[in-house]
Amino acid sequence: MALTLQGYPDFRAALGFANFERGFQITPGTSDYPTSGYPITANQLSLGNLYGARVLAGNAAAALYTPKFVLPAASFGTPSTDPSTSPTINMEVTVADVQVANGVDLSACKWIVKFEAQGE
Protein backbone atom coordinates (compact mmCIF):
# COMPACT_ATOMS: atom_id res chain seq x y z
CA MET A 1 0.00 0.00 0.00
CA ALA A 2 1.48 3.30 -1.05
CA LEU A 3 -0.75 6.19 -0.05
CA THR A 4 1.28 9.38 -0.57
CA LEU A 5 0.58 12.25 1.83
CA GLN A 6 2.18 15.49 0.69
CA GLY A 7 1.78 18.38 3.12
CA TYR A 8 1.29 21.95 2.02
CA PRO A 9 3.99 23.98 3.82
CA ASP A 10 1.83 27.08 4.37
CA PHE A 11 -1.40 25.15 5.02
CA ARG A 12 -1.21 24.86 8.80
CA ALA A 13 -3.32 26.66 11.36
CA ALA A 14 -3.59 26.69 15.14
CA LEU A 15 -7.20 26.14 16.19
CA GLY A 16 -7.03 27.41 19.72
CA PHE A 17 -4.62 26.48 22.46
CA ALA A 18 -4.15 22.77 21.71
CA ASN A 19 -5.68 21.99 18.31
CA PHE A 20 -4.18 22.16 14.84
CA GLU A 21 -5.31 21.84 11.24
CA ARG A 22 -3.07 20.86 8.35
CA GLY A 23 -3.69 20.36 4.62
CA PHE A 24 -2.38 17.49 2.50
CA GLN A 25 -2.62 16.22 -1.05
CA ILE A 26 -3.46 12.51 -0.91
CA THR A 27 -2.53 10.23 -3.81
CA PRO A 28 -3.18 6.46 -3.64
CA GLY A 29 -0.73 3.94 -5.07
CA THR A 30 -1.43 1.64 -8.00
CA SER A 31 -4.05 -1.06 -7.32
CA ASP A 32 -3.37 -1.05 -3.58
CA TYR A 33 -6.68 -0.16 -1.90
CA PRO A 34 -6.81 -2.19 1.36
CA THR A 35 -9.88 -3.70 3.00
CA SER A 36 -11.31 -1.16 5.51
CA GLY A 37 -9.54 1.75 3.82
CA TYR A 38 -6.13 3.39 3.91
CA PRO A 39 -4.80 3.77 7.46
CA ILE A 40 -3.41 7.25 8.12
CA THR A 41 -1.40 7.95 11.26
CA ALA A 42 -0.81 11.16 13.17
CA ASN A 43 2.95 10.54 12.75
CA GLN A 44 2.62 10.59 8.94
CA LEU A 45 0.97 13.99 9.23
CA SER A 46 3.39 15.42 11.82
CA LEU A 47 0.38 16.10 14.04
CA GLY A 48 -0.86 14.97 17.43
CA ASN A 49 -3.79 12.58 17.86
CA LEU A 50 -6.48 13.00 15.22
CA TYR A 51 -10.12 13.89 15.65
CA GLY A 52 -11.26 14.52 12.09
CA ALA A 53 -10.60 15.13 8.41
CA ARG A 54 -12.51 16.64 5.53
CA VAL A 55 -12.05 16.73 1.78
CA LEU A 56 -11.62 20.18 0.24
CA ALA A 57 -11.26 19.19 -3.42
CA GLY A 58 -10.35 16.40 -5.81
CA ASN A 59 -9.24 16.01 -9.39
CA ALA A 60 -11.49 14.76 -12.22
CA ALA A 61 -10.63 11.08 -11.60
CA ALA A 62 -11.48 11.48 -7.89
CA ALA A 63 -14.91 12.93 -8.71
CA LEU A 64 -16.23 9.38 -9.17
CA TYR A 65 -15.34 8.44 -5.57
CA THR A 66 -16.20 9.65 -2.07
CA PRO A 67 -13.52 9.37 0.62
CA LYS A 68 -14.87 8.93 4.17
CA PHE A 69 -12.69 9.29 7.23
CA VAL A 70 -13.41 6.74 9.96
CA LEU A 71 -12.08 6.90 13.53
CA PRO A 72 -11.86 3.77 15.71
CA ALA A 73 -15.02 3.01 17.71
CA ALA A 74 -13.09 3.78 20.92
CA SER A 75 -12.89 7.45 19.89
CA PHE A 76 -16.59 7.97 20.53
CA GLY A 77 -17.81 8.63 24.05
CA THR A 78 -20.82 7.13 25.76
CA PRO A 79 -23.19 9.10 27.98
CA SER A 80 -20.75 8.50 30.85
CA THR A 81 -17.42 9.00 29.07
CA ASP A 82 -15.85 11.75 27.01
CA PRO A 83 -14.93 11.24 23.36
CA SER A 84 -11.21 10.86 22.67
CA THR A 85 -8.80 11.41 19.82
CA SER A 86 -6.91 8.67 17.99
CA PRO A 87 -3.38 8.18 16.62
CA THR A 88 -4.99 6.70 13.46
CA ILE A 89 -7.87 7.35 11.08
CA ASN A 90 -8.89 5.28 8.04
CA MET A 91 -9.76 6.76 4.66
CA GLU A 92 -12.47 4.57 3.17
CA VAL A 93 -13.27 5.19 -0.48
CA THR A 94 -16.83 4.59 -1.67
CA VAL A 95 -18.97 4.70 -4.79
CA ALA A 96 -22.70 5.20 -4.17
CA ASP A 97 -22.05 4.64 -0.43
CA VAL A 98 -20.47 1.20 -1.02
CA GLN A 99 -16.78 0.74 -0.24
CA VAL A 100 -14.66 -0.05 -3.30
CA ALA A 101 -13.15 -3.52 -3.55
CA ASN A 102 -9.75 -4.47 -2.16
CA GLY A 103 -7.04 -3.77 -4.77
CA VAL A 104 -8.97 -1.19 -6.82
CA ASP A 105 -6.64 1.12 -8.75
CA LEU A 106 -7.21 4.66 -7.45
CA SER A 107 -3.78 5.96 -8.52
CA ALA A 108 -5.28 8.56 -10.89
CA CYS A 109 -7.19 10.11 -7.97
CA LYS A 110 -5.90 13.02 -5.91
CA TRP A 111 -7.67 14.72 -3.01
CA ILE A 112 -6.83 17.78 -0.92
CA VAL A 113 -7.74 17.06 2.69
CA LYS A 114 -7.62 19.00 5.97
CA PHE A 115 -6.81 16.98 9.08
CA GLU A 116 -7.71 18.20 12.56
CA ALA A 117 -5.61 17.09 15.50
CA GLN A 118 -4.60 17.76 19.08
CA GLY A 119 -1.33 19.53 19.82
CA GLU A 120 1.79 18.38 18.06
Image (cartoon, grey):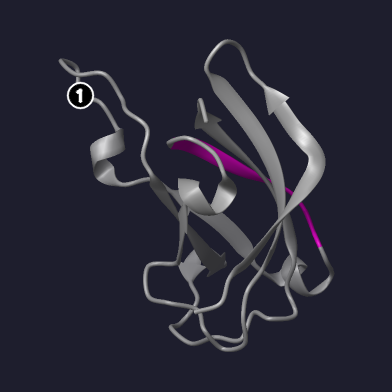
Q: Residues within 10 Å of mark 1 (few under 14, many from 20)?
A: few
Secondary element at tag 1: loop
Tell me the kind of residue under disc 1. Thr
Could you say which quadrant of the image residue 46 lies in? top right
Residue name at image x 72 percent, y 44 percent: 23
Q: Is-magenta flag for residue 16?
A: no
Residue name at image x 31 percent, y 25 percent: 83
Task: Residue 8 in the image: state x and y as whole percent.
Answer: 79, 47
Q: Is residue 28 above or below residue 10?
A: below
Q: Residues in magenta?
A: 50-58
Residue name at image x 62 percent, y 87 percent: 30
Residue name at image x 71 percent, y 71 percent: 64
What secondary structure predominates along the stretch shown in magenta? strand
Residue situated furthest left in the rendering: 80
Query: Residue 118 vs residue 111: left or right?
Result: left
Q: Is residue 104 above or below residue 44?
A: below
Residue nearest the observer in this picture, 37 or 119: 119
